Image (spheres, grey):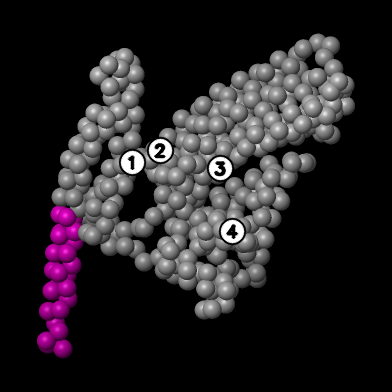
Amino acid sequence: APVTAPAAPAARAAGEAEETVRAKGVAVASKGVDLACEKIAAMAKAAVVDPDMPRPVRRVAEAVVDGFMPEVRDMILESATAAFRKKVDDAAKMTAPAPPCCPNFPARVRAHVLYHMFPHDKTIWACVKDPWWWFYTQALGAFPLWGVTTAWWFVVLAFKWSESPVDEFQLVDFVVSFKASQFTTACVQAMVVGATLYASCIPDCSDGAPGSEPAFRETLWLFFARVLLCWVALGLLPWSAVKGGYHYEPVRGELASVARKGGRVWYWMCYDLVVAAGCLALVAFIYAQPGGTDWVQNAQLFHVKVLYGMLSFPWMVLKLPMMYSLILSLKPTNYNRAGETVRPATGKEMAAARDARRGKVGPA
């Protein structure tokens, strides 16, 4: 006992020394990254900006480069300071099992839906082999009648929101995915359907024109109601938390990030709000026209829906690789079997999960 008495003060001193070294290393790395980013920005501007550009165009190009640099700095800084930080162990969370059916059956349903729709340990190819993925995302998520699609995505949003705190990435991804799907469903698919209906109904389109299907107008209003659903998701952002990527223990003297929740997605939503308002104005104008026949009016409303879908194309840009990191400054997350938000699994973790599903190791 007398030999081990000084162990506690010595351990504290060693811990203090380690914390000081970690903090110093992060500070030095941060200064180096700042200097490097200044040079990267200067090189990017030299490559992008042409001296013969008109001054307004040159200013816009420089502003775009400056706008991207904070995200670039964060990505470089995380890699540069990883050696000085301690990762928070999340192995138990990554392999958490599904909750039991009793006594909380709704929690089991929620976890089942979120995991099979947004699994953390499956690639898209593994999802395609999952019947539940098809059922939740396609059968319910894209059902064209009776407002099933709108009701289902409201349920999905409620499931995501029920986790406290809700994940920032999941809320933004809900909005981006929802709006990007409008381009494919309300524009591309609708244009093909509309062209086919016009080709089949000529010369008399009073019965077979676009918009002649039963309950078309009710479905149209449900389509515009999805705009409100996206704003509800963004309205939850102030109460969200960042759960993506690896988490590290805080370093002494490091300031917490005060970035606006959602990043630049607010610019896209303001654009979408203007587009939706313009389309609703066109709908009001069509309704106000006197003496119009029902099939002509329905066809005009169908074209407004196609226009709204066409103007949703900018959302497709955010679905391109790396755009969440560069434009929105978000780290991706998915759900484990327990319905908890976690980072996407690594290749090694996915291989272990694949073996478990095939019964090679552990339970399915």
Question: How far separated are the C-alphas under marks 3 and 1?
Answer: 21 Å
Badge 1 marks a residue whose secondary structure is helix
Instruction: Name the image quarter holding residue 90.
Output: bottom left
Can the viewer see residue 271 in this picture? yes
Horizontal and vertical percent position of residue 32: 17, 46
Q: Residues within 10 Å of mark 2 (few under 14, many from 20)?
A: some
Question: How far separated are the C-alphas under marks 2 and 1?
Answer: 8 Å
Three-letter code, disc 1: Glu
Q: Is residue 241 left or right of residue 134?
A: left
Badge 2 marks a residue whose secondary structure is loop
Upstream in the sequence, badge 3 or badge 1? 1
Q: Which residue is mark 2?
A: 327
Badge 3 marks a residue whose secondary structure is helix
Q: Residue at x 47, y 69 (%)?
A: 351
Q: Is residue 204 above or below residue 215?
A: above
Three-letter code, disc 2: Ile
Q: Which residue is mark 3?
A: 177
Upstream in the sequence, badge 2 or badge 4? 4
Horizontal and vertical percent position of residue 34: 20, 41
Bounds of the magenta span? 1-25
Upstream in the sequence, badge 4 or badge 3? 4
Q: Is residue 230 above or below residue 54?
A: below
Q: Is residue 140 left or right of residue 294?
A: left
Q: Which residue is mark 4?
A: 127
Q: Quadrant of the C terminus?
A: bottom right
Badge 4 marks a residue whose secondary structure is helix
Q: Which residue is mark 1?
A: 71
Three-letter code, disc 4: Cys
> Does the residue at mark 2 contact the one at mark 1 (Cβ under 8 Å)?
yes
Horizontal and vertical percent position of residue 331: 41, 49
